[in-house]
Structures are given as structure tokens and as C-alpha cells.
Image (cartoon, rainbow, N blue to C red):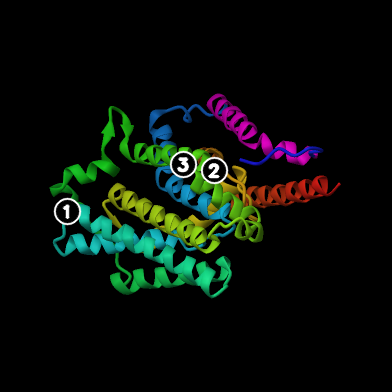
Amino acid sequence: MTEKKSGKSLFAGIFEKREAMLGIIVIVLFIILSITNKNFLKWSNLKVVISSLSVDGIIVTGMTIVLISGGIDLSVGSTMCLSMTIAALLMRAGWNPWPASVVGIATAGVFGLLLGVMVTKLHLTHFIVSLCFMGIARGLVYILTSGSPISLVRVFAEHTNFAFLGQGTIGQFPMAPVCFIVIAVITEIYVRNSAGMRKVFYTGSNENAAKYAGIKVDKIKILACIACGALAGIAGIIYMIRYSGVAVSAGSGEEMIALSAAIIGGASMNGGRGSVSGSVLGLLFIVLIQDALTLMMVPSYWQDFIKYMIVLAAVSLDAITLYHSSAAKNK
């Protein structure tokens, strides 16, 4: 989605090929794991890898939209958990799962709306507001549940059509990733082809220029936040169905996974760049690395260390790319 400029630096060229390079890296990594570990290609393991993409992938999609607009949402994990908590409590109170889930997703969207309004109208930073919302949403989860998990095994046993979204299969393929793929494809098409998303890119690239061009910047930012919140809510519903209930710690650390995948996939912390396909490839890269470490029985604390080192490298590459691109334009 980046515009071509004359006199591009090496780093700018690298960015433009980021998705292709990342795709090649993922394929090479897949081949290496297939050769070096006999358990990698077993369907039981591949099913885990594929299923890992469903919830994380939906959240990454929303995070990408916010990053393109020039913002960031650190509350996605807690918002996801709040969404499924609201839906689960309504189901336990006798509600049908479908309208209960709609209310849960709407709650997540309202959190996104509030985030966008506070950022645009009160001129607060996304980082601070979303960090506060992360604590508020998680606090509400503990208040509503008294810190206890919610089981929905009986509810889903009675509503098998609804449970199919997260627990069903199409042949051998799990349904939850199918939901993610549908959402990702629709969003990717919209991001690449819609006039509305071009305004989001313009806003993230240069907010002042976007204002002078007649773009309603505040509205764009608010809508991006709502989209991110609502997608986190949808991810929460899929998670809830998949595990037949709600764990109060669900979604912890989700913001870092989403942020890492989006940045590795080419989204910029400074806004104006990114794609859903790139972010999904970034997520697949992270999932494959985690799966490889798990198969090699690497301790969890080493896994976190390696994961965050990869994130640091991705952020550094993004900063270097931005610096050299700016230097090339100013020549």
C-alpha cells in the first residue's frame, strides 16, 4: 500500500518486499521443521498450529487497522475476555447464545468507541488510554465473575449449531480457523480496495495533510478503534466456544502477540502502513517459532525471551526502514 518514490533506499526496497520475503521465510521454516522434527507434520500437531491462528488472527486483523490509522490498542486481550464474559453470563441467565454473543461483541465495540473518543476529543495518547482500558476491562471481568471460571458445557450441548463455530469440523479441518479465514479475506479485500481504507492510510501517514484534504480524521480514528474492539469481541466468542467456557485470565498477553505479528508483517508503529495478509504471515511466523520451541521442549521462559527478541528486532527494522525512507525523500 506504500506509494513508490524515486531514489528509494535499500531499506525502503526491503519494506516493499516485506510480505514476499516473509512468505518465503515461513515456507522455508515450514520445510526445515518438517525435515528436522518427525512430529511436526503429524495432523495432531498441525491442527494445534492451525487452531492457534483462529483467535490470534482475528485480533491481529483489528490491531492492523488501528496501527494503519496511527494508533495502538493494548486492551485487545482484556476486551476479548470481557466480551466472552458478558456473553457467557447472559447464556447462564437463560439467553440464547446468538443474541448473548452479539451483546458481548457490542460491548467490545463500545470499549473501542470510548477509546477512540478519548483519543480524539480529549487529545490523549492511544498508549495511555488503551493501557488504562486494559486494566478496566480485566477488572470488570474479575468483578463479574468473582475470579471464578465460567463453564458452558451444558449450554453448548443444547445449542450444537452455535457450538459448531468453535468446536465443529469440516471433514478433518476445524471450523474456528475457517471463521478467521473468512474475516481475514474480507478485511484484506476491504483494506486493499476501499476508498474508506485509503482515508485510514492517509490519516496514519500524515494526519495534518489528511485534515487539509478534507478527511474527517477524528471519525476515521474512532471507526478504526471500534473495528479493533469489535474484532477482539468476535475473537472472544470463538475462544469461549472453543474451550466451552471462560477463564478469567484469557487474553493475557494477546496484545503483544497481535502487535508483534502486525509489525513483523510490515505494519508501522508510526501509522500509514500495513496489510492484513502481512500481519497474518507475521502471526504464522510467530506460531511456527513457538511450535518449534515446544516440540524441542524449550522451557516457557526461554520461549518468551526468544519471542520478545524477535519483536525487538522487528521494531528496530521498522524504525531503520522509516529513517532511511525519510532520508531518501529529503535528498
Taking the image as drawn, is residue 252 in sight? no
The stretch of residues the image draws in magenta is: 9-35
**Which quadrant holds residue 223?**
bottom left
Disc 3 on helix, strand or loop?
A: helix
- Horizontal and vertical percent for residue 294? 51, 42
Please state if 127 lies on the left or on the right of 249 as rendered.
right
Of callouts 3 and 2, which one flags the residue occurring earlier in the amino acid sequence? 3
**Which quadrant holds residue 265?**
top right
Q: Nearer the viewer, mark 3 or mark 2?
A: 3
Kind of residue indicated by mark 2: Ser
Q: Main secondary structure of the magenta part?
A: helix
Residue placed at 69% from the left, 40% from the top? 15
Q: Nearer the viewer, mark 1 or mark 2?
A: 2
Magenta run includes residue 22: yes
To which residue does mark 2 refer?
A: 279
- Horizontal and vertical percent for residue 298? 56, 45
Q: Which mark is residue 190?
A: 3
Residue placed at 80% from the left, 46% from the top? 329
- Horizontal and vertical percent for residue 284? 52, 39
What is the C-alpha distance between the residues marked 1 and 3? 35 Å
Of callouts 1 and 3, which one flags the residue occurring earlier in the amino acid sequence? 1
To which residue does mark 1 refer?
A: 155
